[in-house]
Amino acid sequence: MTAPSRSATPSGAPSRDPDEAMVHAMCAAADAGDAERFASYFAETAVYRFANQEPITGRSAIARATASTVHLVWPVHHQVDQVAKVGAQLFCRFTIQVEKPDGSTPSMPCVTVIERRNGLIVDYRVHMDITPGLR
């Protein structure tokens, strides 16, 4: 197991690690509500599972599901707290903040396990309770 990497260097500058850069870019796509760009990080046959929901299979299905959920929790901001690599897997710890219509901005802890092959995500699992962030 490799040592956990941090999302920023001690000076506060973003990490140059390519895996962390991918996580940050993917989060930026999600934060922008860009479902197609978000899905572009996934293999054609990737599996995406959010909490206890049924798995979603396939890049186009992941894009459609992402686009259809934007209205439930958007605007959203992913703060990448930590990325740790173990073999082909990335274990990512986030703080996710949403802006609700009443002006509140709940912050929710999240852990995502990402498995990649040939540079693309083949398995993506999100572990979090999104309930506080729903409209």
Image: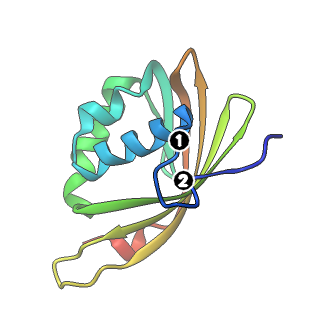
Q: Which residue is mark 2?
A: 7
Query: Is residue 55 visible to us here?
Result: no
Q: Residues within 10 Å of mark 1 (few under 14, many from 20)?
A: many
Which residue is located at x 56 percent, y 14 percent? 118
Where residue 93 appears, x then y in whole percent?
A: 58, 58
Describe residue 44's horizontal placement relative to residue 18 as left or right. left
Q: Secondary structure at mark 1?
A: helix
The colour scheme used here is rainbow
Mark drawn on residue 5: none
Against 125, is 43 above or below?
above
Give the Cα separation between the discs numbered 2 and 1: 7 Å
Query: The residue under label 2 is which amino acid type?
Result: Ser
Against 60, is 3 above or below?
below
Describe residue 90's horizontal placement relative to residue 37 as left or right. right
Residue that lies at the very extreme toward the right in this rendered image: 1
Query: The residue under label 1 is which amino acid type?
Result: Glu
Query: Is residue 127 visible to us here?
Result: yes
Against 60, is 129 above or below?
below
Q: Secondary structure at mark 2?
A: loop
Which residue is located at x 30 percent, y 79 percent? 105
Classify the position of the C terminus by image quarter.
bottom left
Which residue is located at x 25 percent, y 38 percent? 35
Where residue 54 appears, x then y in whole percent?
A: 49, 43
Q: Which residue is mark 1?
A: 20
Q: Residues within 10 Å of mark 2 (few under 14, many from 20)?
A: many
Q: Nearer the viewer, residue 131 or 93?
A: 93
Q: Nearer the viewer, residue 12 or 125?
A: 12
Which residue is located at x 46 percent, y 54 percent? 13
Q: Is the Cβ of the residue at disc 2 closer than 8 Å to that at disc 1?
A: yes
